[in-house]
Image (cartoon, rainbow, N blue to C red):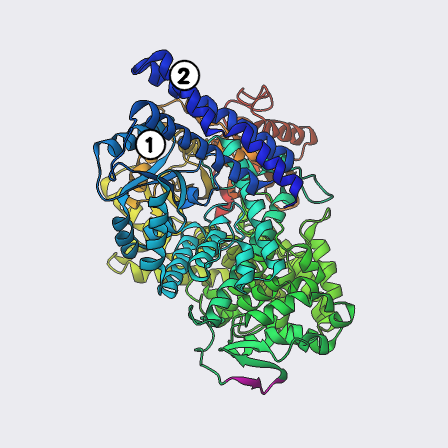
Amino acid sequence: MNKRSTNRSARNLAEIADPDALAGELGVLFEKHGAGNDFRAAMLAHLKAFRARGHETIETWLSEDGRGLACARRIGALQDAIIQGIYAFTTRHLYPVTNPSSSERLSVIAVGGYGRATMAPGSDVDLLFVLPYKKTAWSESVCEQMLYTLWDMELKVGHAVRTVDECVRLSNADITIRTSILDARFICGDRALFDELEERFQADVVAGTGPEFIEAKLAERDARHTRSGESRYLVEPNVKDGKGGLRDLQTLFWIGKYFYGADSGEGLVEAGVFDKSESRLFRKCEDFLWAVRCHLHFMTGRAEERLTFDLQRGMATRLGYLPHPGVRDVERFMKHYFLMAKDVGDLTRIFCNALEVQHVKRTQVLSRFMQRFRRRRPGKLSDSDDFVIESDRLNIADDLAFERDPVNLIRMFHLADRYNIPFHPEALKIAHRSLKLIGPKLRENEEANALFLKILTSRNDPEVVLRRMNEAGVLGRFIPDFGKIVALVQFNMYHHYTVDEHLIRSIGLLADIDHGRLADDHPLSNEIIRTIRSRDVLYLALFLHDIAKGRPEDHSIAGARVARRLAPRLGFSAADTETVAWLIEHHLDMSMIAQSRDLADRKTIEDFAATVQSPERLKLLLILTVADIRAVGPGVWNGWKGQLLRTLYYETEPVLAGGHSQEQRKFRIESARARLRKELSDWPQAEFDAYCERHYPAYWVRTDLPRQIEHARLLHAMDGKGGKLAIRARPDEFRDITEITVFAPDHPRLLSIIAGACAASGANIVDAQIFTTSDGYALDTIFVSRELPEDADERRRAERIGKVIEQALAGAVKLRDLVGQRAVTKGRIRAFSVEPDVLVNNTWSNRYTVIEMSGLDRPGLLYELTDVLARLNLNIASAHVATFGERAVDVFYVTDLTGQKITNANRQAAIRRRLLQVFQPQKEGSKETSKDGGKDGARAGARAGEAA
């Protein structure tokens, strides 16, 4: 820090944090009002105003200079002034002691985060009151007065009142207390007591316990990462406790202070842990993260630590980010954030590796999925003279290894993968400093490219090695197009990770499928991956499928171009290169068709088969699609999506193989019935046969066995009671959703009524599956977002939704009024805007007009869309409901009341106009009876499409 900035910071602090002046002002108020309620009210008003003015000034300074660490220190200094002023006033005016005894001493000490003299506006105030040996009436009165004043100021105050002996004893017994006192900082009172505590703490607690403390803090860090999300690339990161956040830096600070006696980055340089550039990086990361955290608190007016979508736009504006072509301002800010989080990860790795080298932290293997780690004798590897085993880690033989042969920058990661050896910190450090050696010559080197392909397609654990390459900066330099998407954020609620993290995770999931570790979740992928002709094609296509994100053009088309350049470089033939490019260009097709098209419609299958063209491409596309969806984030994949993808695969495969899909379909239906018969062996054969006849073929190919069993028992129970309506709810904790199954007589507007009842109950529909039985009933399954953590509570909530559905079907409630009270966009989703689109298409089906609608999701959207379709006198033959984060995509196969397609251009325009109004409910017409349709419309007619 230069002298000018130091003086400016000091001048600023003097303006806002003068404890003597504050104590004098409180004394004037005391003289004016005397002891009593009037004084207390005036004192609290003065203190709150003092703090508010200080925060307002500090926020202004933060906006002007952008210095996050300085801001945190200014807030800490302001809090110091408040506590010092209150203490001085209390001991001078309320509880003065003219000739204090040895027991009438008190030291007020900041501990925890406050002890580091850095605070965010909403941070807790952690105080330790240290007494000489026993509590006296004086010390008790002073502590109470100070605490009650701070509490009445509405501050979150953590406190303890202890003697020095108690502090030492409790520190030895509790690692949290030990860490808190490690950060202890004198504020006011008796300095000698603080000095005694520091001396005793070092001698009786710290001495000889470094390794124990380090293991405890690193275990605590790992548990915190598990709670807040394992990846540092979660798109809604926790700035304080998330991986790559402030707490990680603070953990390094704690360990550095405890083990090395270093209380700053410069101290860690002197200890030989960091070099000067790494120390500067430490300070840079700390400054940036503190700026974000302080802005977060100022923006929200509370101790908000999570950078949620609805706050990211405002943060980008506050920090001065501007949009670039293809990249929004908020995405540029979040990319910078994740690059900083990556730097924190680099510093953490360097630090921990240094500790391992000094044998105070256990050495880790590279991957838990690879063979058991065996200690290797120190010395050179047989594969290369440029690498050695040192302290059970892979190191370079000398500092010139990379300059002597730049291929070693790739070879190092190949050797680590081959032998499951973790990296020596020196090797990674020198590799990072040697990135300039990765240029056009190395990128075109045949051996380097062959080694990279071996890493990418490794049968060990390619995800781990690719992540290490990415963290070292090697991956982005060797594959420049990958470097462009490092830390790139897609500003939407669907993707949970940055683009580079998503790609690397998808490779890990593909490796899991390849090894058979996901056979239960993905039986078809597990089966067909052993029959594909080229693993290399599949791995490269998956690695590159989102490589062109963040560009103005369609990322699938641009990504295919990248593949056509890169694949030949990696040794792929022209045919395999074209297959890789095709997979990238069409990597979204199978998912979109499975989730938003009628798979029972012959035209859907024929069109998809015409796009795919070969059984081999179909296999590759299925496996790629599964890995891609799974890698989006937790809770995105579910069993129903798996069933839809398998159905699309099984329907398309015989068409591509030149066989008859209808024969295959009949075989699959017979197999499905046979499996169900085995599960319902107690049913009489005649009863089972009659039940099977109630379902159309589409039901048997689109519904998995567990749901078939559940449906059969639900209908059987209803028939036994002679009922006409059955509703069952089933929470699914793993998928974070709740299924509500409704079996009722089919009639106009049924889907609209069910959707409206869910919206009226505050339930957010994320998916829907609808069927009609041959005896005129509807079997609908609605998937709603889970809201309660316990299954029993969530089941009761779902049962209440079921009651509303029942009341709505009986006409006992006015859905429109109830939905109107709920249909307000809330929470994170308000941060997004999705351009609504309505497509009326007559080419996707031979029998139906297909209406595809997409726009910003909100409560009650499905109800309003189906209500409009009913008012337009359209029969819904099938509905396909999907949400991709904040974006809803709803597809309906419809006819007019005579069973014909909608071919009139004017009527198509009217349909588009009315449906677009649903996405803009503030405009008139969204809740009125349409001029283009009647009061009622059929929901599905006979749903003839399912009988086909």
- The residue furthest bottom is 382
Q: Which residue is mark 1?
A: 806
Q: Measure how far apart labels 2 and 1 are at the Cα level.
A: 69 Å
* Residue 864 position in % (x across, y down): 51, 29
Which residue is more in the foreground, 787 or 465?
Answer: 465
Q: What SS does tag 2 mark?
A: helix
Which residue in the rendered view is the most extreme toward the front?
99
Say what secondary structure mark 1 lies in: helix
From the viewer's perspective, tell me whether residue 843 is left or right of residue 369. Answer: right
Residue 318: within the magenta?
Answer: no
Image vertical order of residue 484 relative to residue 17, above or below: below
Magenta stretch in the rendered image: 378-384
Q: Amino acid at mark 2?
A: Val
Image quadrant assignment for residue 98:
top left
Please report contact status of discs 2 and 1: CB closer than 8 Å, yes or no.
no
Within 10 Å of the Cα at label 1, are there few (<14), some (14-19), or many (20+) other Cα atoms?
A: many
Q: Residue at x 43, y 41 (%)?
A: 114
The residue carrying mark 2 is 28
Q: Is residue 17 above or below residue 398?
A: above
Q: Is residue 462 visible?
A: yes
Q: State left or right for residue 164 relative to residue 853.
A: left
